Amino acid sequence: ITLLTDFGLQDGYVGVMKGVIWGICPDAHIADITHTIAPQNIRQAAYILARSAPYFPPGAVHIAVVDPGVGSTRRPLLVTTPQAAFVGPDNGLFTFALDEPGARAWKLDRPDYWLPDISRTFHGRDIFAPVAAHLACGVAPYVLGSPIADPARLTPLLAERHGNNHIIGHVIHVDRFGNLISNVPATWVAAGNWT
């Protein structure tokens, strides 16, 4: 099970989620991808998760909690692909996984697999961690939720090419070392003169 959040490490939120997971699935292995996503930055979280998830073994369960809509009517979501499962809010965070062949989406609507008392602001602990633990211990997706056909997706940020030497793109991530990662394809840059 992996964890990716915007919780930081100052408070006990991440540790509590791990405690919930181990309480349900004591043999679970847990890896932290990051907990330093900028607060409520869904697009940054989606980028980092998409770049990290392929390096985990088949069957990995990824919990991602960057959730500006917590406490609202947004749905809790499970996305399954042939390689992995993704648990978190239905807010576009799993757009890349939904684009994989064979991906399926499930609305998490079976409270028997959640903690008994649901906080308005900590679904990571009360819904997502328990569901991920049950998945890791072999509970099937259809037991945890109902299939849906309309999960939220992020609007693509596409680079634009104007003529032979003008490109408009977006910086989609700045890493810890100050490297700027953009959505401009490398082949465009290598093709010649541009501004």
Image: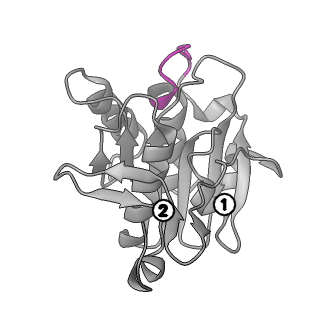
Q: Position of residue 45 (x, y in %)?
A: 44, 45
Judge by depth and name the residue closer to the eye, 125 or 166: 166
Q: Position of residue 78 (x, y in %)?
A: 63, 48
Judge by depth and name the residue closer to the eye, 168 or 89: 168
Vertical side of 81 occupied by 124: above or below: above
Left or right: 4 as drawn, with respect to 94:
left
Residue at image x 50%, y 58%?
169
Which residue of the protein is positioned furthest toward the bottom in this rendering? Answer: 191
Q: Of marks 2 and 1, which one's residue comes earlier in the chain?
A: 1
Mark 2 touches mark 1? (CB < 8 Å)? no
Whether the magenta-drawn stretch holds residue 85 is answered as no
Tell me where the magenta segment starts and ends, as one range. Answer: 116-124
Q: Secondary structure at mark 2?
A: loop
Q: Quadrant of residue 57?
A: bottom left
Residue at image x 47%, y 21%?
122
Q: Secondary structure at mark 1?
A: helix
Left or right: 20 as drawn, with respect to 128:
left
Left or right: 139 as drawn, with respect to 31:
right
Majority secondary structure in the magenta region: loop
Kind of residue indicated by mark 2:
Asn
Q: Position of residue 134 (x, y in %)?
A: 52, 47
Vertical side of 152 occupied by 76: above or below: above
Coloring applied to the structure: one colour
Residue at image x 54%, y 72%?
83
Q: Position of residue 172 (x, y in %)?
A: 43, 51
Q: Is residue 109 visible?
A: yes
Q: Which residue is mark 2?
A: 183
Q: Which residue is mark 1?
A: 98
Kind of residue indicated by mark 1:
Leu
